[in-house]
Image (cartoon, grey):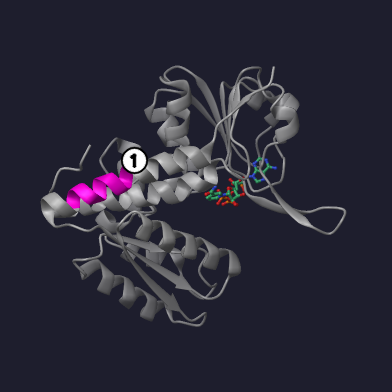
Amino acid sequence: MTASIIDGKMFAKNLKEEIARKVETLKINHNLTPGLAVILVGTDPASQVYVRNKNKSTNAAGMNSFEYLMDDNVSEEDLITKVKELNKDPIVHGILVQLPLPKHINEAAVIETITPEKDVDGFHVINSGLLATGGKGMVPCTPQGCIMMLKNHLGNLSGLDAVVVGRSNIVGKPMAQLLLNESCTVTIAHSRTKNLAEVVGRSDIVVAAVGVPELVKGDWIKKGATVIDVGINRIEMEDGKTRLVGDVEFKAAVQRAGAITPVPGGVGPMTIAVLLQNTVTAACRLLGVNEPE
Ligand code: NDP
């Protein structure tokens, strides 16, 4: 058996087109242009690329994009002051502070300053709480993108056995919560899990969010399972060049899975698309207008 490939690029393209249509409707019907503000501290090259892509995609969807670049040694106080300013700004509906932040800044303190309604990354404790209790908050973009692809591919997820490998606050835990909300039977695995191969082997859905290249071996995968690979790892090859691989041993997994996301081109492209979707949702909720279909 060879797995079908879940094309995240195509999925994200369609979602972005749908968002652009919603933005157009909001402009015409409500004179509302959703606006996303992104704060980048420092000059980390990977973060710079993400922020540039976010800016491009936001503009392409017809939305306003505001970018704030801050020096590596900006104080926590100054960063928090900027966030508070954006909280009050009526043309900003979504605020994202690019992580990681420099060591001298307390990330949690900064995130907790963002108004939960504008927290389009969904990292604020109020939003984590709402996700855990079935409320209407902002859902973190990467797991939300994963659940959208899973539902699109499998339809109803109810009753399926799912494992999430990784328990970070930004991917693993919200992913597990979303799967639970879809009535999956969810196992969360992590670095202390005993016999990961066996846990993965009994799962109909495998979500890998670890950050270890090809940790999840292809022959662990249950035949026909759906595999979502969140990992993005840059590895060096023998010829000195580098390439991106996921947390799943793709070549072998593709022989057993029913469907699998590739790296690159799987989960990655969905994250930005969902960020735009969250900004549209935030704008509609803040202004009390119905989100266009
Ligand atoms: P973190 O480092 O915050 O968390 C990694 C998790 O993996 C931890 O819970 C850790 O367990 C677990 N883990 C580490 N080693 C093992 C192991 N040997 N066996 C089982 N579990 C293990 O990472 P993130 O959640 O932030 O990111 C995970 C991956 O997803 C990364 O590759 C990252 O680049 C990628 N990513 C991709 C995004 C996208 O848009 N596609 C967005 C965000 C992240 P423990 O808690 O016990 O230490």
Is 185 within the magenta?
Answer: no
Outermost right residue: 238
Q: In this view, does 258 lie above or below 234?
A: above
Is 19 within the magenta?
Answer: yes
Q: Looking at mark 1, is its residue's CB closer than 8 Å to ligand 1?
A: no
Magenta stretch, main secondary structure, is helix
Packing grade of label 1 (10 A; few <14, some 14-19, many >=20) is many
Query: Between residues 215 and 265, which one lies in front from this camera angle?
Result: 265
Q: Residue 112 appears at what percent x and percent y? A: 34, 62
Res 110 quadrant in image: bottom left
Res 90 quadrant in image: bottom left
Residue under pointer 1: 131
Tag 1 secondary structure:
helix
Q: Is residue 179 above or below residue 127?
A: above
Q: Which residue is drawn at 43% across and 27% down?
A: 152
Q: Which residue is drawn at 50% across and 82% down?
A: 73
- Picture quarter with the N terminus: top right
The magenta segment is: 18-26
Q: Which residue is drawn at 26% across and 74% down?
A: 85
Using residue 114 as the reference point, say whether residue 207 is left or right of it. Answer: right
- Picture quarter with the C terminus: top left
Q: Residue 181 appears at what percent x and percent y? A: 37, 29
> Callout 1, which amino acid?
Leu
Q: Residue 7 appears at what percent x and percent y? A: 54, 35
Query: Between residues 27 and 289, which one lies in front from this camera angle?
Result: 27
Q: Is residue 285 visible?
A: no
Using residue 289 as the reference point, say whether residue 49 is left or right of it. Answer: right
Q: Is residue 288 above or below residue 79?
A: above
Q: Residue 50 appears at what percent x and percent y? A: 51, 61
